[in-house]
Amino acid sequence: MPGTINGVSVNALPDWGSTVDAVSGAFAIQHGLQISPTKTQSIRLLGGHTADSIGRVVGHFKFRDEEAAYRREFHVLRKSVCDVVLGRGFLDLSKTLTEHCHRVIERVRPCVRNGRRL
């Protein structure tokens, strides 16, 4: 989902299974987002994996071509393949997956690998 955090363009991943909103540490540092250090917290991911939250960032997320900005607290993940993850709480609040599903411009579908074939 295209949008901005504090004016910085980003393609955010909506994750209905996530209980938190998150940004990657690399994204936060690259764009000068002020990281408030916190005690390291493990966050469970799909498949039983975990990610370490090393701090928090407060930012205003805005969907592309919309005026409303949402003040959110993002966990800063030490390692993340996504720059921004929007969790269930935000998706419910902004009604992104119900009334405003047009915000999602691309869908990621998990694939099952069977040997060398997908």
Image: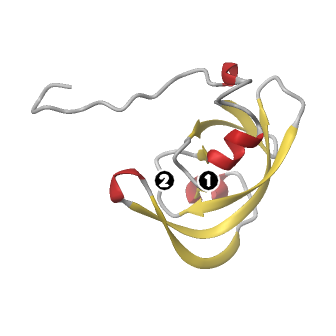
Picture quarter containing residue 49? bottom left
- Residue positioned 70% across, 51% down in the render: 31
Q: Position of residue 12 (x, y in %)?
A: 62, 38
Most distant residue in the bottom direction: 39
Residue found at the far left of this picture: 115
Relative height, residue 98 to residue 55 (above, below): above
Q: Position of residue 58 (x, y in %)?
A: 78, 59
Left or right: 117 with respect to 40? Answer: left
Q: Indicate which disc residue 80 carries.
A: 2
Q: Amino acid at mark 1?
A: Val
Tell me whether circle 1 and circle 2 mark residues in contact (CB < 8 Å). yes
Which secondary structure, mark 2? loop
Residue 23: which numbered mark, if any?
1
Q: How many marks?
A: 2
Q: Which quarter shows the N terminus?
A: top right
Residue 98 horizontal side relative to residue 112, left or right: right
Local SS, label 1: strand
What residue do we see at 41% from left, 63% from top?
Answer: 50
Quarter of the picture holding the C terminus: top left
Q: Residue drawn 63% across and 61% down?
A: 75
Q: Residues within 10 Å of mark 1 (few under 14, many from 20)?
A: many
Q: Residue furthest right?
A: 67
Residue 4 vertical position relative to residue 25 in the rendered view, above or below: above
Label 1 to label 2: alpha-carbon separation: 8 Å
First of labels 1, 2 by sequence position: 1
| Mark 2 surroundings within 10 Å by alpha-carbon count, few (fewer than 14), some (14 through 19), many (20 or more) | some
Q: Position of residue 84 (x, y in %)?
A: 61, 46
Q: Nearer the viewer, residue 91 or 22?
A: 91
* Front-most of residues 8 and 12: 12
Q: Residue 65 placed where, x, y %?
A: 81, 23
The kind of residue on which mark 2 rests is Ser
In percent of the image, x 59 and y 55: which residue is there?
Answer: 19
